[in-house]
Amino acid sequence: MTPILEQFRTFCTLNAPETLEQALEYFAVFGGMEGSVPMALPLEAAIEATLLDNYAVLHRDIAARTGGDSDCHALLSGIALGDRRTHSAFKRARLSAEAGNKALNAMCDAGLIVREKARPNSFSWIDGDVISDRLHFTAPYLRFWFGFVSPLFKGIREGEYGEFRERYANRSAGFAEQVFEALAMELLKAEFREDPISTIGGYWDQNVEIDIIARTASGKTVAASCRYSNGKLKKSELAKLKAQCERAGFTPDVFVLVAKNGFSGELRALRGEALRLYSLKHFGKLLQG
């Protein structure tokens, strides 16, 4: 599996996006594909020209990796459109646990999906609870394909894109959030050089979900919230993150907020050793390695 940071750097080198926002939004759709993307086109037009118009060729390539198995395709669409948790993906795909696990193991072996295990701690893990794994596509374009293209293949195959356009219009908002979160983890690794991050990932249990929890080499705990929205992040987001950590039993040494469009003045005034703020402009550092 090619790491997400390497995929992002390759994509930006090959396609020379004009802005970081364009880089992230187009990468969330096309990341991991071979070849260049028509960046001069609006995103939806680029999708149609690159993916939909070439459906037959791309479908053959993907079907070779999935074996054309209907359960696998249903599972992959369930992951792409759901909350990334195993039980939710099985439910969306209408697969039993047995059939779902068989398909999931096959897709992990094929290199399309990786599992992220829940990380229990002494506060949140209750004996007998089962915390579902989270599932991630190994390339952004695979997630887009199984979210927007594969489920609508009949019309797309015939050159009819109306159903795709309707689904895309209804579901495209915030589609880049997962990629933003994944790259935010890479940004934190780069920013914490004075006390390197030793472990990093998401945290979730039955009641709480925290975008990023990390541990540094010195033993400090870092908790982060990522928001890919057009508005500036407000102080209430920090309060929400603190409340989530308290419910999960964490006492972070450092809080981090990562926001596409920056922060309110009130929040910027709190910035310091215990609160770090990063906006989209900081992601340019990821291209310097």
Image: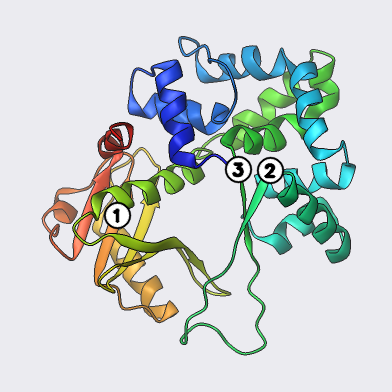
Q: Is residue 228 left or right of residue 142?
A: left
Q: Which residue is mark 2?
A: 112
Q: Quadrant of residue 102?
A: bottom right
Q: Earlier in the sequence, mark 2 or mark 3?
A: 2
Disc 3: CA contacts within 10 A as few (<14), some (14-19) or many (>=20): many
The image position of residue 149, as x and y in percent, is 73, 29
The image position of residue 120, as x and y in percent, is 52, 78
Q: Which residue is mark 3?
A: 138
Whether label 1 touches label 3, CB < 8 Å: no
Q: Is residue 243 visible?
A: yes
Whether label 2 touches label 3, CB < 8 Å: yes
Q: What residue is rendered at 26% in x and 53% in y?
A: 234
Question: Residue 257: which disc?
Answer: 1
Q: In the depicted view, which residue is nearer to us: 261 or 134? A: 134
In the image, residue 163 above or below residue 2: above
Most extreme residue toward the bottom is 127
In the image, residue 75 above or below residue 67: below
In the image, residue 216 above or below residue 162: below
Q: Is residue 250 left or right of residue 129?
A: left
In the image, residue 30 above or below residue 204: above
The image position of residue 58, as x and y in percent, is 74, 22
Q: Earlier in the sequence, mark 1 or mark 3?
A: 3
Disc 2: CA contacts within 10 A as few (<14), some (14-19) or many (>=20): many
